[in-house]
Image: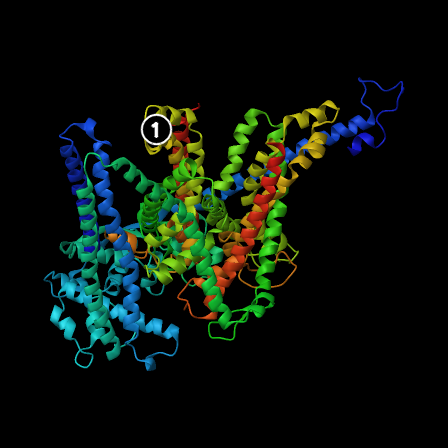
Amino acid sequence: MSDFTADNGPAKGDAKSSLFHETTRTKRRNAAETRFKAYGIAAIATGLFFLVALLVAILGNGLPAFKQTFVTIPVELTEAKLDKNGNRDPADLAKVSTFGYKPVVTAALVSALKAEGIEIPFAKEEDVEDILSSSVAAQVRDTVLANPDLIGETVDFRLLASSRVDGYFKGRVTRDALVRDKNLDAEHLDIADAMVAAGLMKTTFNADFIFGSDASESRPEQAGIGVSMVGSLFMMIVVLALALPIGVAASIYLEEFAPQNKWTDLIEVNISNLAAVPSIVFGILGLAVFIQIAHLPQSAPLVGGLVLTLMTLPTIIISTRASLKAVPPSIRDAALGVGASKMQSVFHHVLPLAMPGILTGTIIGLAQALGETAPLLLIGMVGFIASNMPDGITSGFLDPNSAMPAQIYEWAKRADPAYYERAWGGIIILLVFLMTMNIIAVLLRRRFERRW
Amino acid sequence: MPLLWLFILILALGLIGFILGRARALKNANGDIRLLHSLPTYYGSNVLLAILIPGLAVMVIWLILQPMVIQGQVSSMIPDTAYSDKGALNLVMSDVRRVAEGLDIAVEQGTLSHDQARDIRTELTDIRARLGAVGVALGSNVESYVLKAAQKYRTMNAVGNWMMTVAVLAAALAGFAISYMRTNKDMRARNSVEKVILGLLIAAASIAILTTLGIVLSLIFNTIEFFKLYPALDFFFGTTWSPSFGGGSELGILPLFWGTFYVSIIALLVAVPIGLFAAIYLSEYAGPKVRAIAKPLLEVLAGIPTIVYGLFALLTVGPMLMTVFGEDGGLGWMQGGRSVMTAGLVMGVMLIPFVSSLSDDIINAVPQAMRDGSLGLGATKSETVRQVVLPAALPGIVGAILLAASRAIGETMIVVLGAGAAAKLNLNPFEAMTTVTTRIVSQLTGDADFASAEALVAFALGMTLFVITLCLNIFALVIVRKYREQYD
């Protein structure tokens, strides 16, 4: 109230005071008003600015991860090197390791360059192989083992370029930076430029990033998020299968049946507290109970799912109770009036009417669980390379796997900047999932929401 | 997978029980549904539940108890000379389990026959090589006592599984027999089914209590273990944090507390003014159109996973701050991209929607009459907000800020990626510092041995974190609740 009492308003009987002319005090007050409003606008603008900055950072850094530089060259699979006995016996073929394939691929690259008339400025021609990823020998070997009849023929292969070359075309690696890099020389980049001009090298969409598996620390060009996506999927199955029925059952009890007593109070207090417990504490719980005591396998999606279930239960219970509360009492009264039992009125009438709200809440809870990382770190979902797709349903639940956010964290920890690009790309995929789930939730609400 | 088969068998039994129970009730009423007390499905469900509940309950209890009993029996077989303390015993036991599993796998794959697996001797066969061949890698050669224990483990497991199958089936069949015999047209099937369902609902609701209990117990037991190894006073008042798994670590929590506190303060300094002003503008000034667009957009910030914020801090905000405050910028205050400022700023952004939507609700709850009164006296809108609305909403806003603080203290991914790993007591906000949550992650990831003070300290840290956030939450809820009572 200080503004009003400070100098007791405009002087009484002042002839100059008029509603048509602003006094200095009114001006000051109006200026304060404008300023206050401007603070509010500035606050919202800052918030939105951060949102835009975040999205720009994500898209700008992450979109390149979806493209990859490939080298397409004909590789002559010489029988003398790959199958000395010449009998195509799979056991003999498997004995030739990736080291046996490496010279074959390098020779193919050298001859392809010569065929295009690209000069190789190295003392040893084999040094040109640094342009290719170190995974290419394994790629060729897998193809040959899968189809031994190819030996002796010349086959066109689409091979990964090394992450440095890939980074050069995406602007991540500059020639200046290569001076201190012993993996690649500027001459390699000259060759790469010439290869692009000759059509041997191309940067195209890379489906392996979305569906492939993680790779070792030195081969960022090969890493993909597919396996950890499957891990996340299995975790979400566990969460959905446990959290939805338990959450709905708990909410029905608390909303429809619970008497007012100490036990009910205790449950209510616990639920609201659990909703605010830091997620890492749930990770400690999972580590102590599921792994130390119950001896469930470490890093398994089953354990991750159990931990995330406990974490999402409060969210689901809170939203389910809200949608049960929104069903008008007249529905219950009508059901009871025609002779239904209390249980029948709830399960036959109230629950179906509350279902859209419950599903919306569940989807939002699942989205929250999908993006959660901290508890997964404690149950061991990081620190290894998630390179194998699970073979079946049991192995999907029980074999060590990563999850999308844990995989992103793993990539962010690795030293090679090429992995940062992968991490941002992983975030785009994660956000696409979250956005889809949230949009489904909003549409469900719009489509089925009833107003009584 | 015998367990899965047993489960399916029980379900199938339940289904048969459902059909039989329903049929018996109808037959008893001579097919006239009007003579029944309840609808026919209730008679079926009654039998179904009488089969499933005892069967599954026995199964779950057995599955929990069997490993404990076997563990106790087998570990008493291992000579005292083979291990020095409890941690070493656990290692030996995990070897035993691996050998036993390996033998089972070898039998399954056909490399060993049943008799061979039973009579295998360490003196005669290289077990490590044999098991390595079926894909079970062992760290060292198998001692004869380990093999003996493993054999015992295998036989007990096999016997235990048979006994479980028998017990589960017996419980299920007994439930079936009793409920089937009791089924007749006058039985109050609906009432008993509903009673069971109510029991299940109560059990589901009690899971919240079980979770809290699990959290508290797992924290307390491990914290007590930790304080046996490391004095509590040194933990709470030590000013150095330098864990080394070789021993001789100093585990004082104060530097971690300071880091946590500092990051949270910076986060709140960012989030509270922006969030509060945004809430005021949205609830007092903005038209419905602006509100309909700006509010959900701000709330998008709350839906973004924390790992995204962590990466944003590490790779975008950190380097950006470096160009201004780092050596290149000429100020030279910052040594690396990871710092208290980096993590604090980004965490502040994360908390903006949290503060703004809570405050928005609270400001909207202030009765319109109070605003009208103030405006009627000639106050401008901003004067009304500052002198009438905000004082009235203050307790609620304080509650919201406390909730945001508890979020900031418990936040993990942003600080793990953005704040650094060095435990320091330092005033410079551009210095890398570490927090309680960061240390929990780093002490518990990797192959930590759970008997060492360096791993157990994470539980003590977790306990402290849990207690602090719990107090903040309860305090905030009390304040908010008290405020609500004034106007409702």
Instruction: From the top left corner, tell me how far across and down residue B381 is, in percent.
Output: 69, 28
Quadrant of residue B123 within the rendered picture: bottom left
Residue that protrudes farthest toward the front in the picture: B186
Left or right side of A79 for A230:
right
Disc 1 residue crowd, few under 14, some 14–19, many 20+, Cα 10 Å: some
Residue appearing at x 61%, y 33% in the figure = B363
Q: Position of residue B215 (x, y in %)?
A: 45, 56
Total numbered labels placed on residues in the image: 1
Instruction: Describe the colour scheme in one phrase.
Output: rainbow
* Residue type at numbered disc 1: His
Corner quadrant of residue B325: bottom right
- Residue B51 appears in view: yes
Q: Secondary structure at mark 1?
A: helix
Tell me if I can see residue B335 in this picture: no
| Residue hosting label 1 | A349
Closer to the camera in the image, A367 or B196: B196
Above or below for B346 versus B422: above
Q: Observer-nearest residue: B57 or A2?
A: B57
Q: Is residue B70 left or right of residue B159?
A: right
Q: B34 or B409, which is in the foreground?
A: B34
Q: Position of residue B398 (x, y in %)?
A: 63, 43
Dot 1 falls on which chain?
Answer: A
Instruction: Name the quarter where the C terminus of chain A is drawn.
Output: top left
Q: Quadrant of the N terminus of chain A?
A: top right
| Image height of A359 relative to A211, above or below | above
Which percent across, then down, holds residue B360?
Answer: 58, 34
- Residue placed most toward the observer, B270 or A79: B270
